[in-house]
Amino acid sequence: MIKSGCETEMKDTLTGLDRYEVFLEKLQQELDLIGDDNIVVIYTDIKHFKYINDTYGYKVGNALLKEFVAEFTNNNRLLVGAARVYSDNFVAANRISADGYTKESFREMIRRRNQEWETKFREKYLNSRLQFCTGISIVNKNSRSLDAETVVSNANLARKVAKEMEDDCCVLFDQSMMEGIKREVEITSSIPKALANGEFKVFFQPKIETDTLHLMGAEALLRWQKPDGSYIYPDEFIPLIERSGQIVDVDYYVYREVFRFIAKRLQEGRKAVPISLNVSRVHLNKMHILEYVKELFEEYQIPYSMVEFELTESIYLDNTERALELIKGLHNMGTKVSMDDFGSGYSSLNLLSKLPIDIIKLDKVFLKEGDLQESDKIIISCVVDMAKKLQIMSLCEGVETMEQSNYLKEVGCQMQQGFYFSRPIPQEVFEKFIDEN
Ligand code: C2E
Ligand code: CA
Ligand code: CA
């Protein structure tokens, strides 16, 4: 059948769904006439869809999108409209009677439906790890003053939260999510000023050699001290500035401070120890980092052995090839590289033998509060043993008690770091620490 020009303009050519603008108009009409019903907006994104395009090609990718749309709109009497927002992002609106279900029961229904689709699609597209991530925003007569765009954007916000969760990929929008966004904007917009005003401070956490209990290095850890004296900790602001890309400048700031510090110690004829620098995953997209570090070595003229780099375990899994390229670049320069947070995520033992890393940093998850668990002891000793056989040094993080420290000695873990020895400390205090050691 030949469609009229007008009809095709209203539809998405690939899926036959309404174009997004048309969907918004329909949704607005429904909201204007809400009555006693609820309007439920469901925003779904296909996680790991890129894998399909990359592995099977675009033709298969397009077919999958069509299959998905068939499921998404299948047999749904309550559907008032559906659209492809872009790429693999879809939105649908349903009019539902307010009786007979709660927000939570509706979420549960969608979650189960997503899981059924996942099973079906994963059987067809093997190894794809496809997952359907959904955000749900429900409007009733009390909240009907919201406009269509806001309702979709709320559902999309919930979808983003869902996407960050490992299992439960289906989330209801909640006003508190807006607070999170406000905080994010507040933080990211104040970064340039914070950099210019010297609000970022580099702290140092000593690393201790297990056999001698001597200081053998330190890790540089960032602290943000606001003008009012309060601190914002990296766990809060780093994920946000990774998303905005600002972490690159912030990391470079840390690196320069550390180079300056080491150069100063050496010029004064005082002892210096190797300092390790954290490398954000974001550097992998740009790869300017190698040039930047090279320039720092030229400018400050410190030995290559004085700085090391920590790449978190998940970086290797995200993009093994780029990570390998980065490690090689750093090695060519003559610096050591460690695998940070080993054991915190889906560690791949296989990676250890593939990547030429020098040090493995066991994550603090193995040293939970209280007595050492038998199972953690087994894992620690096996990892240390395996590292030794692969000629990789091992360091355990998060050591808080003498018992833990002694156990690490018993199994031959060469280095330790944690509150038992010292918290991260400001430069002046760390200088005393070095002098006294
Ligand atoms: P990380 O690289 O795993 O750093 C170790 C974290 O464990 C630090 O948290 C440190 O204060 C904490 N820690 C050390 N010893 C103990 C202990 O005995 N017990 C417990 N419970 N915790 C301990 P911090 O400083 O809050 O940093 C958090 C994370 O932020 C770091 O984890 C790192 O991923 C990131 N980060 C910090 N500074 C930088 C930086 O300059 N650049 C980048 N890209 N990331 C950074
Ligand atoms: Ca680290
Ligand atoms: Ca770590």
Image (cartoon, rainbow, N blue to C red):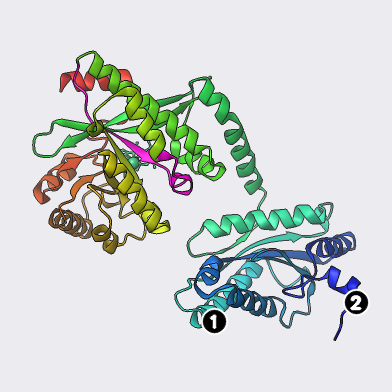
Judging by the rendered image, the residue that carries numbered circle 2 is: 4
| Point 49% across, 33% down: residue | 249
Start and end of the magenta stretch?
270-289
Asked if residue 426 shows in the view, the reply is: no
Question: Label for residue 294?
Answer: none
Camera-nearest label, 1 or 2: 2
Q: Please indicate, yes or no, whether residue 78 appears anywhere in the rendered image.
A: yes
Q: How many marks?
A: 2
- Residue 288 inside the magenta-drawn segment: yes
| 275 relative position to 40: left or right | left
Q: Residue furthest top?
A: 268
Instruction: Residue 428 in the image: state x and y as whole percent.
Output: 31, 17
Three-letter residue code for mark 2: Ser
Residue with the mark numbered 1: 120
Q: Position of residue 294 (x, y in %)?
A: 35, 34
Image coordinates of residue 257 in percent, x first then y, are 38, 24
- Which of the 4 quarters of the picture holds residue 134? bottom right
Quick one: SS at disc 1? Answer: helix
**Is 85 placed left or right of 348 in the picture?**
right
Q: Quadrant of residue 111?
A: bottom right
- Mark 1: few, some, or many residues within 10 Å (few <14, many ≥20)? few
Of residue 350 and residue 347, the one placed in the foreground of this image is 350
Q: Quadrant of ligand 1?
A: top left
Say left or right for 269 vs 100: left
Examine the rendered structure and indicate whether residue 117 appears above or below residue 369.
below
Q: Nearer the viewer, residue 127 or 109?
A: 127
